Amino acid sequence: MNWTIDELNRAAATCSCGLMHHPIAIREIVVEQCALQRAAAFVKTSFRHVSIFADANTFQAAGSALVDMLGELGVTCGCCIMEPDANGDVVADERTLMQGFLSCSPNTEAILAVGAGTIHDIARFCSFTMKIPFISVPTAASVDGFTSAGAPLIVRGVKQTFQTQAPIALFADVNVLAESPKRLAVSGFGDMLGKYTSLADWKFGHLVADEPYCPWIASLTADALQTCVDHVHEIQAGGPEGLSVLMRALILSGLAMLLLGQSHPASGGEHHLSHYWEMELLRTGKPQVLHGLKVAAASAIIAGLYKERVRERMGSIPRSPTTSCYLRRVQEQKTEVERILADIPSGIDIRSLIRLVGGAENPADLGIADVIVADSLNHAYKLRDRHTMLRFLQA
Ligand SMILES: [Zn+2]
Ligand SMILES: [Zn+2]
């Protein structure tokens, strides 16, 4: 899983899949020890006044060191420590967005997101609205969305994704990652495990509904996933080496989405289940559960469901003139779909990988009730207009 931005852009320019690929405009991606110094040096080359967005923990983990380094280089730096909600969670909602805007001055030339996914979403939205760039400084290998242009925000209690901007650079200091709470890397590994089912759904959507598909981009995501699985013990150990592998895999998964301009490679039925559960937790005022923990548990359920039910459902499609074009198409692609199903590991296999890193194998372990899970299997497909197998099972 060795890649550079230049190599990816060159391969994208010559890809033979026929789709338009979006060149990656991120200037630098650095995952190494001492990446914080590299971040400060990068900021110094282009900016004189920046603002750091963090939460109390991530400010302590990396933000305050970065402020000192920037100060030594003559860059002035405002700080915005996001306030948690009543449950103790920092959420990307009206309150934290406003806190971010209020902390910036007209002189702010760039925002540094120092934290995990939520801090990035706030920084992404604020910087985009202020027409200034943002720089990603992840403090944990927790999600694959650091390089994304989409900002999922909670507006009036409902989660919506806004298209904003990707960072202009990313600096992940592996020593900082190694110091972050273990469950964050478990979440990052879980977000990667979700690719087993998202890649299967993407290929299915392409076969039966012509969704845009690129075998090369799919191979990038698959490669990132396989590398994580190959290094599961190092990732579990939580040292700089394992977390460096995980972080690079998460970033590559994010870049695959940027190259395609869509989230298909990394988000299928398992993410729709996870979103459904998240909305339910929000609606009932419960504390949030880390994204990748939900995704991993959802992926195990989805893998089991697809392997058990999709073949059976294909077999029950009536061969009659009144059968819809869509179902006839699925029937025509039966052999290919069976191949996709054979490539998905079983739910049991996915759960053993979750167990190896100490994650949650079942939604109940995350406080998500069985009734919510049952509802999500019937309704979560409606959250996205995408031809997943979850949707096919309801057709
Ligand atoms: Zn392509
Ligand atoms: Zn995800």
Image (cartoon, grey):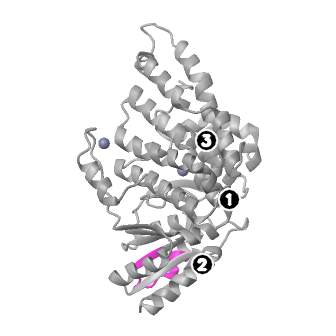
Q: Which amino acid does the dot numbered 2 rest on?
A: Phe
Disc nearer the start of the sequence (2/1): 2
Left or right, 272 with reference to 20 = right
Q: Nearer the viewer, residue 391 or 116?
A: 116
What's the amino acid at mark 1? Arg
Q: Dot 3, how many residues are within 10 Å of its Cα: few (below 14), some (14-19), or many (20+)?
A: many
The mark found on residue 59 in the picture is 2
Q: Position of residue 134 (x, y in %)?
A: 42, 71
Which marked residue is nearer to the observer: mark 2 or mark 3? 2
Residue behind mark 1: 183
Q: Position of residue 136 (x, y in %)?
A: 46, 69
Q: Quick check: 41 above or below 291? A: below
Q: Is residue 100 magenta?
A: yes
Could you classify mark 1 by the number of other residues whose Cα lies within 10 Å: few (under 14), some (14-19), or many (20 or more)? Answer: some
Q: Earlier in the sequence, mark 1 or mark 3?
A: 1
Q: Tell me if I can see residue 23 in this picture.
A: no
Q: Nearer the viewer, residue 363 or 383?
A: 363
In this picture, which residue range is highlighted in magenta?
A: 99-112
Image side of residue 156 versus residue 76, left or right: right
The three-letter amino acid code for the residue at tag 3 is Leu
Q: Is 142 included in the stretch rendered in magenta?
A: no
